[in-house]
Image: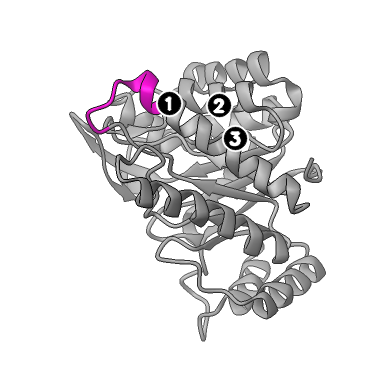
Amino acid sequence: MPKELIKLHFGTAGIPLSTPKKSTINGIKRVKELGLDAMEIEFVRGIRMSEAKAAEAKEVAQSLGVVLTVHAPYYINLNSDDEAKRRASIERIIESARIGYKAGAWSVVFHPGYYGDKPSQVAYLRVKEALLHIVKVLNDEGIDIWIRPETMGALSEIGSLEEVIRLAEEIGEKVLPCIDFAHLHARSIGRYNSYEEFRQVLETIEQRLGKEALKNMHIHVSGIEYGPRGEVRHLNLPETQFRYRELMRVLKEFEVRGVVISESPNLEEDALLMKKAYHEV
């Protein structure tokens, strides 16, 4: 199993906006300067990091105490009817994990795909089958990194809270969910936005995946706009009604460890906002 983190780390989805001369290395350094201690390497448009750059990122991040995570490319659909696209999706997750592991990343998150015209149970089983293969390949290669199916914000996307918990429950080793609280809020058309509902999420995770899951959480947070089909777009926290302070309170009460990644358009501003709120609880 990947190492357990000793606290809750706060950081940005990608290189902070205020980074001069944007690069992964400079982004890690800027994260530290800002008083944050995590950064998600964004492979969302493709995996463009050499092994040498990955090794350098690992060295810099470890020297500064910054935890790295990875977001796999957006072009993934483990339920595609096109077998070539499905295989390519599987390979993108594996390659994200390979390069991420070389960069010292703790966790790699991915979007599972779309239901299309399939019943949700059929789509779920196809994702599970792909994930079992991914875990086997990574085990065979000795790659020790968390693989995280993410809760998704649109009703057309595979990734309900139940689905991502069930994947972790049924596959076990190496697989835990990435809980995107903004996506939960959007997918439920306005629920998951109170102290009680945040508690309910963590209680469910603890009951079904154990305390270990709470000690190894990968969390995404942002403001969000939603409509009748769920997510429309990410927004900055102060522009929305999302009760992030209540979420921070619950994370502290449950002694959650791991990473909280800001996916707001302003990246570091909301990461710092959440860190401040967490420490003020």
* Disc 3: CA contacts within 10 A as few (<14), some (14-19) or many (>=20): some
The type of residue carrying mark 2 is: Leu
**Residue depicted at x 30% and y 39%:** 81
**Front position among marks 1 and 3:** 3
**3D distance between C-alphas at marks 1 and 2:** 8 Å
Describe the element under mark 2 as helix, strand or loop. helix
- Distance, label 3 to label 2, CA atoms, is 10 Å
Screen quadrant of the C terminus: top right
Give the quadrant of residue 100.
bottom right
Q: Which residues are magenta?
A: 116-124
Give the residue at x 41% y 24%: 192
Q: Which mark is residue 132?
A: 3
- Give me the C-alpha separation between circle 1 and circle 3: 12 Å
Q: Identify the disc placed on residue 26.
A: none
The residue positioned farthest toward the left in the image shown: 228
Depth check: 187 or 256 in front? 187
Depth check: give the residue in front, 230 or 193.
230
The residue identified by callout 1 is 124
